[in-house]
Image (spheres, rainbow, N blue to C red):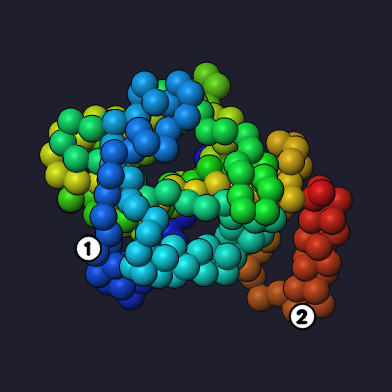
Protein backbone atom coordinates (compact mmCIF):
# COMPACT_ATOMS: atom_id res chain seq x y z
CA UNK A 1 0.00 0.00 0.00
CA UNK A 2 1.31 3.45 -0.88
CA UNK A 3 -0.13 6.99 -0.68
CA UNK A 4 1.04 9.62 -3.15
CA UNK A 5 -0.08 13.15 -4.03
CA UNK A 6 -1.38 13.16 -7.61
CA UNK A 7 -3.24 16.45 -7.95
CA UNK A 8 -1.74 19.88 -7.26
CA UNK A 9 -3.67 23.10 -6.51
CA UNK A 10 -4.32 23.93 -10.17
CA UNK A 11 -5.62 20.42 -10.84
CA UNK A 12 -7.91 20.54 -7.81
CA UNK A 13 -9.63 23.79 -8.83
CA UNK A 14 -10.33 22.42 -12.31
CA UNK A 15 -11.61 19.08 -10.99
CA UNK A 16 -13.89 20.75 -8.44
CA UNK A 17 -15.70 22.65 -11.20
CA UNK A 18 -16.29 19.45 -13.17
CA UNK A 19 -17.57 17.51 -10.14
CA UNK A 20 -20.32 20.07 -9.56
CA UNK A 21 -21.96 19.07 -12.87
CA UNK A 22 -21.95 15.29 -12.31
CA UNK A 23 -25.14 13.33 -11.74
CA UNK A 24 -25.21 10.35 -9.38
CA UNK A 25 -27.41 7.26 -9.08
CA UNK A 26 -27.67 4.27 -6.72
CA UNK A 27 -24.30 2.50 -6.60
CA UNK A 28 -25.92 -0.92 -6.21
CA UNK A 29 -26.87 -0.82 -9.90
CA UNK A 30 -23.29 -1.60 -10.89
CA UNK A 31 -22.38 -3.91 -7.99
CA UNK A 32 -21.89 -7.61 -8.71
CA UNK A 33 -22.28 -10.70 -6.51
CA UNK A 34 -21.77 -10.24 -2.78
CA UNK A 35 -20.90 -6.56 -3.27
CA UNK A 36 -24.59 -5.81 -3.88
CA UNK A 37 -25.30 -6.60 -0.24
CA UNK A 38 -22.63 -4.31 1.21
CA UNK A 39 -22.48 -1.40 -1.23
CA UNK A 40 -24.34 1.68 -0.01
CA UNK A 41 -23.26 4.73 -1.98
CA UNK A 42 -23.93 6.68 -5.16
CA UNK A 43 -22.09 6.44 -8.45
CA UNK A 44 -21.67 9.08 -11.14
CA UNK A 45 -23.53 8.55 -14.40
CA UNK A 46 -21.04 7.94 -17.18
CA UNK A 47 -23.16 9.81 -19.70
CA UNK A 48 -22.46 13.48 -20.19
CA UNK A 49 -19.65 15.67 -21.42
CA UNK A 50 -18.50 16.72 -17.94
CA UNK A 51 -18.02 13.11 -16.81
CA UNK A 52 -16.03 12.25 -19.91
CA UNK A 53 -13.96 15.42 -19.57
CA UNK A 54 -13.17 14.64 -15.93
CA UNK A 55 -12.17 11.02 -16.65
CA UNK A 56 -10.02 12.08 -19.60
CA UNK A 57 -8.35 14.82 -17.54
CA UNK A 58 -7.51 12.55 -14.60
CA UNK A 59 -6.45 9.66 -16.80
CA UNK A 60 -3.95 11.93 -18.53
CA UNK A 61 -2.47 12.86 -15.13
CA UNK A 62 -2.29 9.22 -14.03
CA UNK A 63 -0.58 7.98 -17.17
CA UNK A 64 2.11 10.68 -16.87
CA UNK A 65 2.77 10.26 -13.14
CA UNK A 66 6.36 9.12 -12.58
CA UNK A 67 5.65 7.27 -9.33
CA UNK A 68 3.06 5.08 -11.00
CA UNK A 69 5.28 4.60 -14.04
CA UNK A 70 8.40 3.55 -12.15
CA UNK A 71 6.87 1.58 -9.28
CA UNK A 72 3.80 -0.09 -10.83
CA UNK A 73 4.66 -0.34 -14.58
CA UNK A 74 1.07 0.12 -15.79
CA UNK A 75 0.07 -1.85 -18.86
CA UNK A 76 -3.43 -0.40 -18.93
CA UNK A 77 -5.90 1.53 -16.77
CA UNK A 78 -9.42 0.10 -16.60
CA UNK A 79 -12.51 2.30 -16.78
CA UNK A 80 -12.93 4.09 -13.42
CA UNK A 81 -15.97 4.72 -11.25
CA UNK A 82 -16.64 7.95 -9.37
CA UNK A 83 -18.36 7.29 -6.05
CA UNK A 84 -20.13 9.63 -3.69
CA UNK A 85 -20.87 8.85 -0.03
CA UNK A 86 -23.35 10.88 2.00
CA UNK A 87 -24.25 10.64 5.70
CA UNK A 88 -25.12 7.06 6.64
CA UNK A 89 -23.54 5.53 3.55
CA UNK A 90 -20.63 3.08 3.44
CA UNK A 91 -19.20 0.13 1.54
CA UNK A 92 -18.76 -3.07 3.53
CA UNK A 93 -15.90 -5.55 3.29
CA UNK A 94 -15.26 -6.68 -0.27
CA UNK A 95 -12.50 -7.35 -2.77
CA UNK A 96 -12.15 -6.20 -6.36
CA UNK A 97 -12.63 -8.53 -9.30
CA UNK A 98 -9.47 -10.05 -10.78
CA UNK A 99 -10.49 -9.23 -14.36
CA UNK A 100 -12.61 -6.47 -15.87
CA UNK A 101 -14.39 -6.45 -19.20
CA UNK A 102 -13.61 -3.66 -21.63
CA UNK A 103 -14.93 -2.83 -25.06
CA UNK A 104 -12.17 -4.92 -26.66
CA UNK A 105 -12.04 -7.83 -24.20
CA UNK A 106 -10.92 -8.10 -20.59
CA UNK A 107 -7.89 -6.98 -18.60
CA UNK A 108 -6.37 -8.37 -15.43
CA UNK A 109 -6.64 -6.06 -12.43
CA UNK A 110 -3.41 -6.11 -10.44
CA UNK A 111 -3.69 -2.92 -8.38
CA UNK A 112 -6.66 -0.93 -7.10
CA UNK A 113 -6.46 2.77 -6.34
CA UNK A 114 -8.62 5.45 -4.79
CA UNK A 115 -8.04 9.10 -5.73
CA UNK A 116 -9.80 11.41 -3.28
CA UNK A 117 -11.88 14.22 -4.78
CA UNK A 118 -12.96 15.71 -1.45
CA UNK A 119 -11.02 17.63 1.18
CA UNK A 120 -10.57 16.10 4.62
CA UNK A 121 -12.64 18.97 6.03
CA UNK A 122 -15.57 18.05 3.75
CA UNK A 123 -16.47 14.84 5.56
CA UNK A 124 -16.17 12.83 8.77
CA UNK A 125 -15.87 9.07 8.85
CA UNK A 126 -15.41 7.50 5.43
CA UNK A 127 -11.94 6.10 6.07
CA UNK A 128 -10.75 3.51 3.56
CA UNK A 129 -10.03 0.35 5.55
CA UNK A 130 -7.49 -1.94 3.87
CA UNK A 131 -6.76 -5.42 5.23
CA UNK A 132 -3.22 -6.53 4.37
CA UNK A 133 -3.05 -9.98 5.88
CA UNK A 134 -2.36 -9.62 9.61
CA UNK A 135 -2.51 -5.80 9.49
CA UNK A 136 -5.38 -3.38 8.95
CA UNK A 137 -4.89 0.21 7.78
CA UNK A 138 -7.52 2.97 8.03
CA UNK A 139 -6.67 5.67 5.50
CA UNK A 140 -8.13 9.18 5.61
CA UNK A 141 -7.32 10.91 2.32
CA UNK A 142 -7.25 14.58 1.37
CA UNK A 143 -8.17 16.06 -2.03
CA UNK A 144 -5.62 14.87 -4.59
CA UNK A 145 -4.26 11.99 -2.48
CA UNK A 146 -4.11 8.58 -4.13
CA UNK A 147 -3.76 5.29 -2.27
CA UNK A 148 -2.83 2.19 -4.26
CA UNK A 149 -2.81 -1.44 -3.15
CA UNK A 150 -3.13 -4.98 -4.61
CA UNK A 151 -6.61 -5.87 -5.89
CA UNK A 152 -6.58 -9.04 -3.79
CA UNK A 153 -6.79 -7.09 -0.51
CA UNK A 154 -10.15 -7.02 1.26
CA UNK A 155 -11.17 -3.43 1.89
CA UNK A 156 -14.13 -1.27 2.90
CA UNK A 157 -15.25 2.36 3.25
CA UNK A 158 -16.41 3.21 6.76
CA UNK A 159 -19.68 4.95 7.49
CA UNK A 160 -19.95 8.66 6.71
CA UNK A 161 -21.08 10.61 9.77
CA UNK A 162 -20.90 14.14 8.34
CA UNK A 163 -20.65 15.78 4.91
CA UNK A 164 -19.93 14.15 1.55
CA UNK A 165 -17.01 12.06 0.28
CA UNK A 166 -16.31 11.85 -3.47
CA UNK A 167 -13.63 9.55 -4.85
CA UNK A 168 -12.28 8.37 -8.20
CA UNK A 169 -11.71 4.61 -8.06
CA UNK A 170 -9.74 2.71 -10.68
CA UNK A 171 -7.65 -0.35 -11.44
CA UNK A 172 -4.29 -0.98 -13.07
CA UNK A 173 -3.18 -3.90 -15.19
CA UNK A 174 0.54 -4.05 -14.49
CA UNK A 175 3.49 -5.53 -16.36
CA UNK A 176 4.53 -6.79 -12.90
CA UNK A 177 2.53 -9.83 -11.82
CA UNK A 178 4.77 -11.23 -9.08
CA UNK A 179 4.84 -9.78 -5.57
CA UNK A 180 8.55 -10.44 -5.11
CA UNK A 181 9.31 -8.65 -8.39
CA UNK A 182 7.19 -5.72 -7.26
CA UNK A 183 9.15 -5.51 -4.01
CA UNK A 184 12.46 -5.52 -5.91
CA UNK A 185 11.33 -2.70 -8.23
CA UNK A 186 10.19 -0.61 -5.28
CA UNK A 187 13.37 -1.28 -3.27
CA UNK A 188 15.42 -0.13 -6.24
CA UNK A 189 13.32 3.02 -6.65
CA UNK A 190 13.74 3.83 -2.94
CA UNK A 191 17.51 3.50 -3.35
CA UNK A 192 17.56 5.59 -6.52
CA UNK A 193 15.63 8.41 -4.86
CA UNK A 194 17.95 8.30 -1.82
CA UNK A 195 20.94 8.75 -4.12
CA UNK A 196 19.50 11.92 -5.68
CA UNK A 197 20.66 13.92 -2.65
CA UNK A 198 24.25 13.35 -3.81
CA UNK A 199 25.90 15.17 -6.71
CA UNK A 200 25.97 12.23 -9.12
CA UNK A 201 27.87 12.42 -12.36
CA UNK A 202 26.17 11.85 -15.71
CA UNK A 203 27.91 8.49 -15.84
CA UNK A 204 26.42 7.52 -12.47
CA UNK A 205 22.97 8.64 -13.62
CA UNK A 206 23.36 6.55 -16.76
CA UNK A 207 24.37 3.49 -14.73
CA UNK A 208 21.33 3.87 -12.44
CA UNK A 209 18.98 4.20 -15.40
CA UNK A 210 20.60 1.20 -17.07
CA UNK A 211 20.04 -1.00 -14.00
CA UNK A 212 16.46 0.24 -13.69
CA UNK A 213 15.75 -0.62 -17.32
CA UNK A 214 17.27 -4.09 -16.89
CA UNK A 215 15.20 -4.74 -13.77
CA UNK A 216 12.01 -3.67 -15.51
CA UNK A 217 12.72 -6.04 -18.38
CA UNK A 218 13.45 -8.92 -15.99
CA UNK A 219 10.33 -8.60 -13.83
CA UNK A 220 7.72 -7.55 -16.37
CA UNK A 221 5.49 -9.56 -18.68
Which of discs 1 and 2 lies nearer the camera? The answer is: 1
Tell me if 16 is positioned left or right of 92 in this view: left
Residue position for label 1: 20
> Which residue: 52% across, 53% down?
79
Q: Nearer the viewer, residue 137 or 54?
A: 54
Disc 1 to disc 2, C-alpha distance: 48 Å
Q: Quadrant of residue 38?
A: top left
- At label 2, counting other C-alpha atoms closer than 10 Å, the crowd grade (few under 14, some 14-19, many 20 or more) is few
Under tag 2, what secondary structure?
A: helix
- At label 1, counting other C-alpha atoms closer than 10 Å, the crowd grade (few under 14, some 14-19, many 20 or more) is few
Residue 202 circle label? 2
Tell me if 46 is positioned left or right of 108 in this view: left
Q: Is residue 14 visible?
A: yes
Residue 178 in picture, x, y percent from top left: 75, 38
Give the answer, above or below, for where 130 lies relative to 101.
above
The answer to whether mark 1 and mark 2 are in CB contact below 8 A is no
Q: Nearer the viewer, residue 122 or 77?
A: 77
Under tag 1, what secondary structure?
A: loop
Tell me if 203 is positioned left or right of 147 in this view: right
Amino acid sequence: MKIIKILDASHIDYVKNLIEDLEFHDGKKTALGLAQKVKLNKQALVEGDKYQELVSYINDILTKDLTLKTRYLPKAFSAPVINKYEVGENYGRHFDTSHMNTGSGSIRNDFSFTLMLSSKSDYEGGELKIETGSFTHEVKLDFGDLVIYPCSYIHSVLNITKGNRVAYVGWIASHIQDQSAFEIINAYEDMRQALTKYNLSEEDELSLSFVQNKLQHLVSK
